[in-house]
Amino acid sequence: MSIPFELPADDHGISPRTGCTRAHWEAVADGLLTAAWRRATPGGALLHLPGRPSRSGVRSDGLEGYARTFLAAAFRVAGADGDDPRHWLERYADGLAAGTRTPGRDDTESWPHILDFDVQGQPMVESASVALGLRLTAPWLWDKLGTDVQDRAEEWLRGALRHTPAPNNWYLFPYTVAGFLESVGRGDAETAGARERALDLLESWYRGDGWYADGDGRAFDHYNGWALHLYPVLDAHLSGDADALAHHGGRLRAHLDGFSLMFGADGAPLHYGRSLTYRFAASAAVSLGAVTGHTPLTPGASRRIASGSLRHFLDRGALTSDGLLSLGWYGPHEASLQEYSGPASPYWASKAFVALLAPADHALWTDTEGPAPVEEADRVLSLPGPGLLLQSTRADGTVRLHNHGSDHVRPHEGESADGDDPHYGRLAYSTRTGPTAPANVADNHLSVEVAGRPSVRRRVHPLGAGHGEGWGWAASWHRPVFVAGPPMVPGLTVESVTVARGELELRAHRVVGVPAGSRVTLTGWATGPEEATVSALRGLHGWDDPAPESLPAPQGTAWTPWARVPRLTGGCGGTTVHLALASLTAGPEAPSLERAVTDVRVEDGTVEVTWADDGSRTHVTFGPLEVSHTHP
């Protein structure tokens, strides 16, 4: 699709895969800013972009437009050492003065006050972008403001320090505000307290392998990169705090060991978790690692991932004809959104422009673009900390994530089926498919049907993960919960194991405590009839028929307006084991699941599968769980 602003000519000499250079990134930033500023109020304090309002209201949405685009402008100008030929900073300085003149007033320009997250919380989110933008551009914007405007801006920003954030990554917003105030000599006990509080919580949320939970539960998603790593690492980098940078940067490096594999060869990030409308913000952690030197990737590989992600969305309709980022994935896509999403929400994609903090002579821009991890070899990588299993195939450039540790259920919450979230509860996600909508048949889902009522998976309890040469596994258990009737069946549990080899997935499930006469269903990947991507599913044990039926998902996914989902069904009662093979491939030769294994044995909670290609055997023992893979 055409991009509604001019880009430099592609340079396939320095960037053989994407053609993108630093000049492309600058041109995209300028193009996005130009389009957004056409919707600014006369004083520049609010940018009212077209679209349905968020739950926070139109005024908060206008502040969001100012703050999130300011972040792109700040990275753009700071990375050019203050060179600002389009005078972006003058506009943001005027908007800051207008917005903070009479906060809370119902007029054309005034910003809303920052209050508690459950009262009027969205401005707290935006305060972090305002503060970070001011910190990045301090010599050219903040230092040139009159004292009266500086004082008003400080007073508005301190609202973030004096009110309660949401119990997750939001605590890094007052942390970022406090970091800015301290950087300009306005720190005190209040700013120190906000920073200490955030860092203490961040430590408690660390789960290993470079992954933080987004709060006290087990929510692992893209917020790791564009929030939980970005704010503390960037703060340490800007302040020159070597000890803090070594600590937070070390965790970023560990995170990128696995996260860098979460981008397909076409540039797509994994489609899972919330706030997916931020799109290429997913690459922010990759670029931040390159900027700070805390990355396992070469500069050429880092640019390959970041530019690939940027290009992926620009080339697939993420921009409207007016040059604005739409609410959705490629074009508009309602099922990808949350109720807090407003017209300017997609501009958290501005975080990707942290790449511009690397100057033009930095290796991120001067080294020849190298392959992304998915392009180097087939890989299976387990991440025991978050309970995830990554499976990538070089031939089609597809990455799959098998979820045995991430949910979106806070510790104090009950496991209500009404809270089922397709972006967390499914068994698997990929760079080529999205989950089906809640009203449609669920993809990649095991459901127990008791008295005709299907179950969903809410809280996920990891049982372990590991990998060896060419294979890996992850496992978890959950309590099925039901929408209608009793929310749970006492004693009913499901243990699930995924074993990945090449492009094949062995899915093993043991259902315990099932009332007699119940049913169990397992679905595979959701794909569209016109897509090159092929979804396959084959029953090995515990199903009525090894061949699946194909069910429609009329609301489609982020990839296709209409999808179909393969499904297996079988009877269950007491304790039963159910095995299946699944695959998701994008190429002319999909694997034959019928011939993939030569022998399947299930006895007393132990499973043994013999693979046809090399005679190797996978063993799964339930209760206690053991998974192994041996060669003849």
Image (spheres, rainbow, N blue to C red):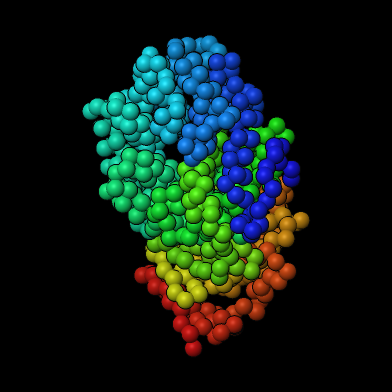
Tell me if residue 540 comes above or below residue 110 in the rendering.
below
Question: Can residue 293 be spotted in the picture?
Answer: yes
Residue at the spot 27% in from the left edge and 48% down from the top edge: 243
Question: Can residue 435 be spotted in the picture?
Answer: no
> Would residue 105 be found to the left or right of residue 58 on screen?
left
Tell me if residue 623 comes above or below residue 44 in the rendering.
below
Q: Nearer the viewer, residue 328 or 298?
A: 298
Residue 30 is situated, as x and y percent measured from the top left of the image, at 60, 35
Residue at the spot 56% in from the left edge and 35% down from the top edge: 347
Residue at the spot 57% in from the left edge and 30% down from the top edge: 85
> Would residue 9 be found to the left or right of residue 251 on screen?
right
Q: Farthest bottom residue?
A: 632
Tell me if residue 118 comes above or below residue 570 in the rendering.
above
Residue at the spot 44% in from the left edge and 13% down from the top edge: 101
Residue 42 is situated, as x and y percent measured from the top left of the image, at 59, 15
> Would residue 295 be found to the left or right of residue 32 on screen?
left
For the N terminus, the image quarter is top right
Residue 26 is situated, as x and y percent measured from the top left of the image, at 58, 40
